[in-house]
Image: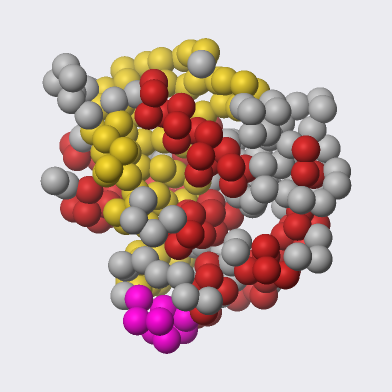
Amino acid sequence: METVSTARAHGGTQGVYRHRSGATGTDMTFSVYVPDHAPGATLPVVWYLSGLTCTHANVTDKGEYRAHCARHGLIFVAPDTSPRGDEVPDEDRWDFAEGAGFYVDATAAPWSTHYRMWSYVTAELPALIETEFPVDAARQSIMGHSMGGHGALTAALRHPGRYRAVSAFAPIVAPTQVPWGEALDRYLGDDAAAKRRHDAVALIEDGARVPELLVDQGEADAFLAEQLRPELLARACAAAGIPLELRMRAGYDHSYLFVSTFMGEQLDWHAARLRG
């Protein structure tokens, strides 16, 4: 693991790091914020998955999480959203390929060689973080924004017991039912079962469970009606008996101004579930 940069912030250290990923076959960059702590102590960790077009840098620069993490003693990890590099297949569009890995392990050519973000964020990177940083692996939670909200929800639903809490900002909750789900068709081909395993609503319909969910959604979000459709998640949670706190935020859009506004409230919610 190579240290790209470190800086002091809110009584802790914000770092950016790079390593060679076996999952993607590329160099991957991620950021980690570690609050100051007693020697030998371990801290709970919050995973944050970013959305379309983003890298680790968007939330690192604009997420306004550090003061809250310092107050609660939370490590905050922000991976990239896709593999990158000259050898990685790409397309000239913002909602597919580089910057839009959708947190799946692609099985269709030409994407299957490098687009293995599911293995990266749920297996490879967690193992590295546990080795290199003072994390308490028994106290993990996960959150994300938009495409990253999709990734956070599906990771928690498919790994019961791993994450003590899961939340999202404006998540894609049912990619198989919205236009952005074309990405799953292209990454996973005709495998309908694989697509359902990367669809939070479908997973809940098929029996996956988490203790509770928290979602913040801007009512002025341009993607709300066509791509996000939180009512589908609300309906699935109600049928499954999963408590869902869906907070519709009047006047807020899809941007990091929205995310940063409610980041503190979501981290407070995570911290309460990561204690002890």
Q: Is residue 127 visible?
A: yes
Classified by dominant secondary structure, the portion drawn in magenta counts as helix
Range of the magenta residues?
Answer: 233-242
The answer to whether 111 appears left or right of 232 in the picture is right
Q: Nearer the viewer, residue 39 or 160?
A: 160
Q: How many marks?
A: 0
Q: Relative to 130, is 249 above or below?
A: below
Residue at x 16% of width, y 47% of height? 275
Which residue shows up at 62% across the image and 21% down it?
A: 20
Would residue 220 be seen by someone viewing this image from the given angle?
no
Q: Position of residue 64 (x, y in %)?
A: 36, 39
Left/right of residue 131 with respect to residue 72 in the rendered view: right
Q: Position of residue 247 (x, y in %)?
A: 36, 70
Q: Nearer the viewer, residue 38 or 21?
A: 21
Where 12 falls versus 244 (above or below)? above
Residue in front for this viewpoint, 215 or 184:
184
Residue located at (41% from left, 15% from top): 6
x and y, in percent, of residue 216 in the image = 40, 63
**Left or right position of 21 against 266:** right
Q: How is the image coloured?
A: secondary structure
Across and down, in percent, residue 58 comes to 52, 37
